[in-house]
Image (tube, rainbow, N blue to C red):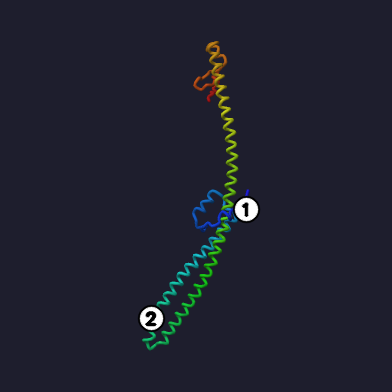
Amino acid sequence: MAKDDGVYISALEGKSIPILTLDDKWHQLFTQTEMTPEIEKLADELNALVERDGKIRMETKKIKKLKKTLLSEIVPLRDQANKSGNAAAIEKEISERTRLINECNEKLDSHDDELLDLSKEIYDVDYKLMIETMKACYETLHTNTEYIKGLDEWISKVRVELKKNVIRLQEAEMENYNLYSYMHQIFGPEVIDIFDLKYDPDRRHPVRRPLAGDETEYTD
C-alpha cells in the first residue's frame, strides 16, 4: 500500500535535509531494505553533482589565491616603474598581470553562477532522493508489519493449541499412571509383566520392555 508523494512532501516541509549520499546513516538504511533502481539513479546523479560542486569550489580557491598573488605584485611593479628607466617593460608586466586578474574575475563570476545552479540542482535531486527513500522504507515497514501481524496471529493460535495439548498430555499421563498403579495393586507385578510394559513413575509414561532376542530399545 503506497502513500502519495504529497504525504512525504508535507512531512519534509521546513526540515533541513542533509546530502543523503554523504550521510552514513542513509547508507545504513539499505542494510535493512533494498535500494530501488530509482534510488540508485538519483544517488548517482547526486554524487556527480556533489563531485562537480567540490571541484568548482577547489578551483575557486586556487583562482582567488592566484588573483591575490597577482594583485600583490602590481604595486611593487608600479613603484619600480616610477624609479626605473625601463618603464615600458615594467608597464608591460603590469598589463599582463592586469589581464590575468581580469581573467580570474571572469572565471570567479562564472564559478559563482555555476555554484548557484549546482546548489539548486543538488537540493532538488537530494529532495527527490529523500522522497524515494521514504517510499522504499515505508513499503518495507508496511510489508514487515503485515508479516509480523501474521506471525503473531499464528503464534497466538499455536500457543492456545499448545496449552490444550499440554493439558491433554498431562491427563493421558495421569490416566496411564493411575491404570498402572491400580493394575499393579490388584494383579501384582507378575501379572503386569504379561502385558510387556514397564512403567517409569519419573517419566510418567510406560515404555516397551524388549522381549528376549529383541534388540530394539524404546526411550523418550
Place of residue 146 in the rendered image (x, y in percent of width and height, measured from the top left): 60, 43
Q: Is residue 23 left or right of residue 39?
A: left
Image mark count: 2
Q: Label 2 is placed on what type of residue?
A: Pro
Where disc 1 sits, the SS reads loop
Where disc 2 sits, the SS reads helix
Q: Can residue 13 be seen in this view?
A: yes
What label does residue 147 carry, if any?
none
At x 57%, y 47%, the residue is: 141
Extreme residue toward the left, this view: 83
Q: Is residue 213 visible?
A: no
What label does residue 76 carry, if any?
2
Residue wearing tag 1: 4
At x 49%, y 65%, the residue is: 54
Of the residues under marks 2 and 1, which one precedes in the sequence? Answer: 1
Number of other residues with Cα within 10 Å of mark 2, as a class: few under 14, some 14 to 19, many 20 or more: few
Number of other residues with Cα within 10 Å of mark 1, as a class: few under 14, some 14 to 19, many 20 or more: few
Q: Which of 14 and 23 is in front in this view?
A: 14
Q: Label 1 is placed on what type of residue?
A: Asp
At x 56%, y 22%, the residue is: 171
Q: In this view, does 127 lie above or below 112?
A: above
Place of residue 52 in the rendered image (x, y in percent of width and height, measured from the top left): 52, 65
Place of residue 88 in the rendered image (x, y in percent of width and height, measured from the top left): 42, 87
Q: What is the distance, in whole Å, between disc 2 and disc 1 at their CAs? A: 66 Å
Place of residue 124 in the rendered image (x, y in percent of width and height, measured from the top left): 57, 61
Q: Nearer the viewer, residue 206 or 60?
A: 60
Determine the image quadrant of residue 62.
Answer: bottom left
Q: In this view, does 138 lie above or below 150?
A: below
For marks 2 and 1, give the one nearer the viewer: 1
